[in-house]
Amino acid sequence: MEDSKKVNHSAVKLGKLSPRHDPRTLQFANYIKSGEMPAPPAMYDWSAKIPAWGMMKNDTVGDCTCAAAGHLIMEWTANIGKIAKPTDAEVIAAYSAVTGYDPKTGNNDNGAVETDVLNYWRKKGIAKHKIMAYAALEPKNHIHVKQSVYIFGGCYIGLALPVSAQNQKVWSVPPGGTSGKGAPGSWGGHAVPVVSYNDQTLTVVTWGALQQMTWSFWDTYCEESYAIISKDFIKKNKTPLGFDLAALEQDLTQIKH
């Protein structure tokens, strides 16, 4: 796994709006109780097969919710076979469809709600790739996060970033805690995928690079997180690590929203 890179934060955009929780959303905990989920190892990394992530226009457009989807598509396909990299135009097309953003004029670049993007991704697809379903993780449940990354190849999350994160190589809670520049959301909302973890940190993809955060940062600033079930990460009805999706199929067919 490559190290986190110093990002010029004056040349990037955010774009995740406040969470909109839907009672119809599948809950990841329901499948943990079924006993079907294997215990995650202490560390795992799916990022090694990606030579370059790409910005996906998130330097100039607030499309992080769709760029995060594009980066997951890259990671899933690279670990199953041949990598598929959504183009900037395909990512922007999805962002425009969800939000009304006009790439010609720049109007309506106001960001997006993660569940709106997830529902669009499931129904319409992003870059011709559809997901089967998504399930909300229990807040601050580190085991859920690890299982989502280990079993399903990633975790789609939303952060309420503090201004203090702008100058950190590793995102962590500042010494002053959640006041002042450490206040949740004082910088803005940001969507990223988690692609690896260990006992000390999680690693996400943002602005074309890998970025580490501490687990305490996750506990403090993560507003929402989802495991995603995608055919891009499945061969012969199983993930690369052998998890059989049969236990989920009945629930997946019942999702109507």
Image (cartoon, rainbow, N blue to C red):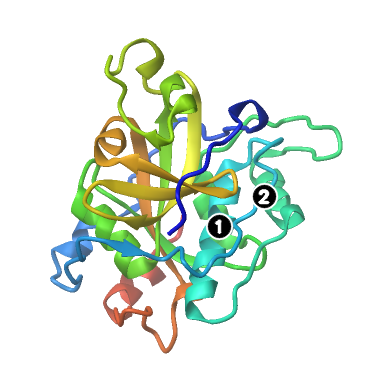
Which is more N-terminal, label 1 or label 2? 2
Q: Residue at x 20, y 61 (%)?
A: 42
Above or below, 214 relative to 73: above
**Is 248 in front, or is 67?**
67
What's the amino acid at mark 1? Answer: His
Q: Are marks 2 and 1 in contact (CB under 8 Å)?
A: yes
Coordinates of residue 203 in the picture (x, y in percent): 39, 50
Mark 1 secondary-structure assignment: helix
Q: Residue at x 42, y 21 (%)?
A: 164
Coordinates of residue 249 in the picture (x, y in percent): 34, 76
Above or below, 31 relative to 210: below
Q: Which residue is mark 1?
A: 71
Question: In which quadrant of the rendered view does residue 178 lie?
Answer: top left
What's the amino acid at mark 2? Answer: Met
Q: Crowding at label 2, few (<14), some or many (≥20) Cα neighbours within 10 Å?
A: many
Coordinates of residue 16 in the picture (x, y in percent): 52, 35
Residue 215 as seen in the image, left or right of residue 237: left
Q: Which residue is mark 2?
A: 56
**Is 256 in front, or is 188?**
188
Q: Quadrant of the N terminus?
A: bottom left
Above or below, 223 relative to 162: below
Q: Could you say which disc has been placed on residue 115 in the image?
A: none
Coordinates of residue 108 in the picture (x, y in percent): 72, 30
Is there any visible trace of residue 20 in the rendered image?
Answer: no
Q: Residue at x 66, y 68 (%)?
A: 128
